[in-house]
């Protein structure tokens, strides 16, 4: 319980009154920050005879240079401006010559300064260059790549000795990373970009000030978990003095619900890490505030944060951010598994692995569309394996949408095949003092950059292995100084590594911080639905699984046509299809194709195959999430590998790079319905999950079973209540006589007003999938559990053809087009697995992104349902889109 809450109302009102009469607008702001994201051009050094002294001179001829994109990469710009064929199509990138990027590339732009600017401290701030650079200004070399090196380092260079009034020219000679160096990168989920992601991949700023710069203002909280409306706030900021004299002034912070200030002195050429605490400033104990909650648990409330440094009645610097009031607690539960609480409430992070665009071309619009997808599915988190983002946009949006972020280093630094140097079996690549210092410095830069984001709930110091003890100690020292508010984990694996070598060759237990409580034991390949409920040794629904998936998630037909030529689509041309999978063990689709063929029957063409792939995607993805929801709190976290796609691919995705959801997307959405009835494969029972904020009372769960002839052969119901944030057993299905080889389980939940709040249809087989754990032990790398016998759904072909009735209405508001589609099944047969798509009649392409409230739906006989879809009007230029519907036994129809 916190104190001081009851005595600070008057102090808070007084402080708010004082600060209201002392605003930045009434004082002169003497600093400026300009983004240098414009006017950049680039060219290969192979095509240039001149050196940096000439290239960085005003008037240098760049007519034959290419337009560059900053932030971005060389290949991203060459692609965007049509210099090269789209590398993401077919095998175009595979055919590219990597030699053209192995020599340095020059980047060049100009900026202007006034005479007044020259009387101040002028600096260039680089948030990220991949991987090293020589910097030249106006014909003079500012710094060489022996200093300006390290992908995740952030650099500020004083350039007063190199600038002039009027136009100034910057030139950077950028070199890609060499084998053995720590790099920005993608792991085995897509091909390595041919340019190795070389370029200015993060923002560049021109900073003009009187020598004082505020960096990384940060607010963290200790929450009153009883009232959930009060907290102690702690504020930190780094004040940089780049002059040769001490600077005295007032550091002032307005955090919207109060303000604090303190007179400070910043030493010459030094950095002051200043802290405001409730022990010194009572007004930091706040009452009647709104907390920041993840999606599904409440509002992701953000407050404004304004930090300024005032001296001689002038504001020397001013920084504005937003922050959230929330507290994360992490612990090992009774099973030694990692668990989390936010603001005193248990939270099970459920989400997927995030990856940026392969050429770092994400925009705020594309990222926000994906945040909407995450929220739309009912997920609450992402895992960033790597410090993604060419700016803070990803993390700003996670803050806004209530999406928790697990973030840290990528496994590509831990394995020789990616890092291209010998790696330690336990500690990966960074074992020398030089490498340890580089990673510690890089971590400090990334942590200070991102620490104010309430969405970030844990720092990951490693992925597949552990940091060297010397490196972990450096991390611990950084946390103590710069972020004492968050938990950290030394690895995404650890749990279970004592008994197997799925993650690493040795047990992953830190000598400093002990076990991680997190598991990363797969599976990573096709896995049947019963695995998630029945497995108690590997990746099943227990503990915190930081990286797992049930299979490939092959894209829908429209996306297949976008990513490869027609002649490669059917029969499946492995040259093309497997180039759009993963690397190493994850290249082949054979396991998934075999399962689809054996369970659903072989296909005659790519349209049939891609459709059956969506049936498979939905069927195997839904139970993965349902099992973790059903088994909580024994299950404490789930990261689907992956959420999205860095480029057009056929594995590990809930939606693809075109933002087309696949069957997996809607399987997840169904599984994460706040109030949801769950069939547990392998147990033939039903669980009820309440992930809503409130207790649900007087519920009715209706249970029906239909045979393959669409005849209802069983019906029952359960009635009762369920508290918030739990799951529980409610019903054991009896043995039912005369089941057909394929049958359907229909589950509905009705609230106390008899309104339907959940509906699910499971298609089941009397022939069960059989997992072969003994065969898994014989694999050289047991990253999945083989299936010795498959369920048989080929009897679905016995369903008679059904013609559905449609009533389609279209409306639009200022932002969205809104489709309302009423669908009725007038027949006596089940209409199975109907996919609804919204089509632009001019392009005949899907309108994306698209937000259906349900999809891939099954309609029992005589049933009528209404569905809604939304899309951004900015993605559609026509008057009214078309809707197409296609099901297993429903012929494709176009509705307009």
Image (cartoon, grey):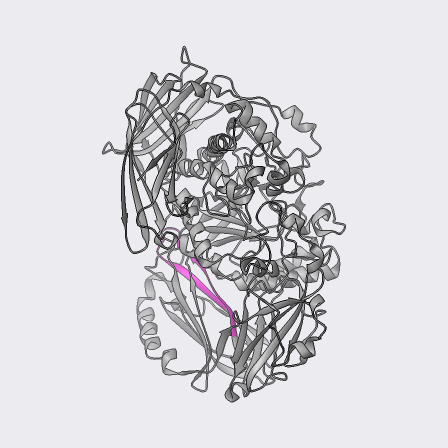
Segment tinted magenta in the rendering: 214-236
In this view, 132 is above or below 652: below
Residue in the foreground of this view, choosing between 335 and 795: 795
Residue ranking furthest to the right: 422
Of the 4 image quadrants, the one containing the C terminus is top left
| Residue 552, x across and y down, in percent | 56, 36
In this view, 816 is above or below 78: above
Residue ranking furthest to the left: 753
Residue in the foreground of this view, choosing between 530 and 189: 189
Q: Residue at x 75, y 52 (%)?
A: 421
Is 310 situated left or right of 63 in this image?
Answer: left
Is 233 situated left or right of 288 in this image?
Answer: right
Q: Judge whether residue 221 is colored magenta.
A: yes
**Residue 836 is drawn in which quadrant?**
top left
In this view, 440 is above or below 574: below
| Residue 604, x across and y down, in percent | 52, 26
| Residue 881, x across and y down, in percent | 34, 45
Say if residue 308 shows up in the picture: yes
Q: Main secondary structure of the magenta part?
A: strand
């Amino acid at each position: 319980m916190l104190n001081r809450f009851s005595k600070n109302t008057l102090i808070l009102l007084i402080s708010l009154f004082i600060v209201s009469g002392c605003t930045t607008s009434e004082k002169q702001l003497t600093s400026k920050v300009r983004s240098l994201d414009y006017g950049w051009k680039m060219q290969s050094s192979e095509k240039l005879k001149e050196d940096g002294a000439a290239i960085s001179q005003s008037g240098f001829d760049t007519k034959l240079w290419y337009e560059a994109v900053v932030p971005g990469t060389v290949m991203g710009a060459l692609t965007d401006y049509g210099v090269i064929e789209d590398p993401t199509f077919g095998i175009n990138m595979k055919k590219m010559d990597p030699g053209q990027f192995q020599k340095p590339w020059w980047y060049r732009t100009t900026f202007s300064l006034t005479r007044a600017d020259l009387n101040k401290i002028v600096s260039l701030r680089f948030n990220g260059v991949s991987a090293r650079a020589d910097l030249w200004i106006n014909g003079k070399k500012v710094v060489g790549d022996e200093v300006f090196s390290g992908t995740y380092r952030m650099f500020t260079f004083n350039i007063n000795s190199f600038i002039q009034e009027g136009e100034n020219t910057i030139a950077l000679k950028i070199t890609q990373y060499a084998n053995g160096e720590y790099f920005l990168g993608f792991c085995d989920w897509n091909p390595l970009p041919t340019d190795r992601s070389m370029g200015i991949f993060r923002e560049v700023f021109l900073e003009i000030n009187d020598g004082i710069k505020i960096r990384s203002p940060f607010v963290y909280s200790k929450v009153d978990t009883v009232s959930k409306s009060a907290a102690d706030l702690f504020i930190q900021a780094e004040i940089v003095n780049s002059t040769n004299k001490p600077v005295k002034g007032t550091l002032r912070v307005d955090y919207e619900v109060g303000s604090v200030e303190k007179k400070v002195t910043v030493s010459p050429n030094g950095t002051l890490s200043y802290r405001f605490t409730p022990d010194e400033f009572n007004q930091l104990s706040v009452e009647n505030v709104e907390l920041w909650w993840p999606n599904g648990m409440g509002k992701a409330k953000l407050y404004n944060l304004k930090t300024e440094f005032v001296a001689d009645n002038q504001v020397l610097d001013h920084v504005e951010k937003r922050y959230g009031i929330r507290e994360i607690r992490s612990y090992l539960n009774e099973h030694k598994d990692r668990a989390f609480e936010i603001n005193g409430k248990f939270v099970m992070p459920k989400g997927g692995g995030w990856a940026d665009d392969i050429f770092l071309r994400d925009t705020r619009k594309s990222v926000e569309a994906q945040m909407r997808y995450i929220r739309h599915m009912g997920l609450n988190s992402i895992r960033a394996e790597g410090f993604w983002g060419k700016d803070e946009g990803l993390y700003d949006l996670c803050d806004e949408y209530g999406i928790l972020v697990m973030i840290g280093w990528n496994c590509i630094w831990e394995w020789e095949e990616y890092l291209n140097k010998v790696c330690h079996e336990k500690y990966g690549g960074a074992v020398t003092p030089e490498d340890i210092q580089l990673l510690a410095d890089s971590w400090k830069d990334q942590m200070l950059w991102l620490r104010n984001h309430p969405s970030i709930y844990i720092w990951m110091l490693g992925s597949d292995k552990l940091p060297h003890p010397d490196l972990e100690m450096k991390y611990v020292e950084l946390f103590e100084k710069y972020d004492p508010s968050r938990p950290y984990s030394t690895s995404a694996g650890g749990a279970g590594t004592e008994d197997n070598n799925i993650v690493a060759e040795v047990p992953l237990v830190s000598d400093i911080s002990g076990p991680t409580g997190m598991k990363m034991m797969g599976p990573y390949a096709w896995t049947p639905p019963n695995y998630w409920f029945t497995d108690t040794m590997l990746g099943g629904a227990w503990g915190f699984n930081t990286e797992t998936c049930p299979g490939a998630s092959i894209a829908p037909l429209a996306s297949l046509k976008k990513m490869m030529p027609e002649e490669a689509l059917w029969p499946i041309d492995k040259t093309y299809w497997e180039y759009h999978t993963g690397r190493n063990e994850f290249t082949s689709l054979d396991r998934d194709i075999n399962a689809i063929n054996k369970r659903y029957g072989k296909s005659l063409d790519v349209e049939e195959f891609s459709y059956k792939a969506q049936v498979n995607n939905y069927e195997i993805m839904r139970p993965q999430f349902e099992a973790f929801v059903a088994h909580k709190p024994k299950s404490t976290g789930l990261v689907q590998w992956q959420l999205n796609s860095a480029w057009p691919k056929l594995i590990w995705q809930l939606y693809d790079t075109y933002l087309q959801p696949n069957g997996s997307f809607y399987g997840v959405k169904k599984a994460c319905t706040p109030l949801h009835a769950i069939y547990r494969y392998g147990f033939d029972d039903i669980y009820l999950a309440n992930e809503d904020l409130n207790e649900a009372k007087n519920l009715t769960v209706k249970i029906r079973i239909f045979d393959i002839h669409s005849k209802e052969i069983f019906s029952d119901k359960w009635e009762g209540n369920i508290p918030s944030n739990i799951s529980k057993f409610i019903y054991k299905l009896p043995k039912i006589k005369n089941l057909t080889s394929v049958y359907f389980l229909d589950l509905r939940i009705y609230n106390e007003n008899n309104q339907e709040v959940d509906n699910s249809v499971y298609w089941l087989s009397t022939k069960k999938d059989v997992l072969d754990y003994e065969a898994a032990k014989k694999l050289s790398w047991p990253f999945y559990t083989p299936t010795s016998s498959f369920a048989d759904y080929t009897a679905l072909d016995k369903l008679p053809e059904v013609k559905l009735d449609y009533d389609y209405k279209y409306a639009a508001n200022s932002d969205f087009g809104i489709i309302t589609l009423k669908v009725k099944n007038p027949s006596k047969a089940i209409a199975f697995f109907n996919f609804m798509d919204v089509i632009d009649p001019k392009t005949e392409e899907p309108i994306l992104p698209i937000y259906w409230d349900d999809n891939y739906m099954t309609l029992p006989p005589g049933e009528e349902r209404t569905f809604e879809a939304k899309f951004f009007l900015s993605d559609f230029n026509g008057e009214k889109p078309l809707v197409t519907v296609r099901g297993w036994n429903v012929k494709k129809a176009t509705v307009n």
